[in-house]
Amino acid sequence: MKTANEAILQELRETTERRAFDGRGTVIAVLDSGVDIKHKDLSADIEYPKLTADKVKEKEAKRKNITMQRFPMLTTMQMETTTSRIPM
């Protein structure tokens, strides 16, 4: 038995297929209400440990390892300039 949401989605899919919608001419907008500065996650009382020099070295080593796995042909010089731009 379908839920109400599943039934609505199925109807939308069928309508889209019937009318041959392909997305051309579609306008998409993102509305953002901003930041809630009172949210607990933005509090100054964060209990996470501070970043130490050892943690930075550990993260850099991990980044270099991931980079070498993704791009094994990189030279050491290329890797040193590339790893700082690859997200973890």
Image (cartoon, grey):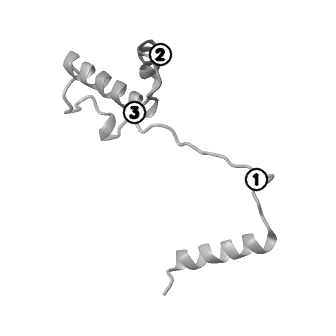
Q: Quadrant of residue 54?
A: top left
Q: Secondary structure at mark 2?
A: helix
User: Which-is-in-front pick, marks 1 and 2?
Assistant: 2
Horizontal and vertical percent position of residue 8: 60, 76
Tell me which amino acid carries mark 1.
Thr
> What residue appears at the point 74 percent right and 49 percent down from the top-left corner?
27
At 73% from the left and 74% from the top, the residue drawn is 15
Q: Is residue 38 left or right of residue 70?
A: left
Which numbered tag is attached to residue 78? 2
- Mark 3 is surrounded, within 10 Å at the Cα level, by few (under 14), some (14 to 19) or many (20 or more) other residues, namely few
Find the distance from the CA under tag 2 to the CA under tag 3: 14 Å
Residue on which disc 1 sits: 26
* Amino acid at circle 3: Gln
* CB contact under 8 Å: marks 3 and 1: no
Element under disc 1 = loop
Q: How many marks?
A: 3
> Who comes first in sequence, dot 3 or dot 1?
1
Residue receiving disc 3: 69
The amino acid type, in three-letter code, at marker 2 is Gln
Q: Given this view, does label 3 or label 1 mark the residue nearer the observer?
A: 3
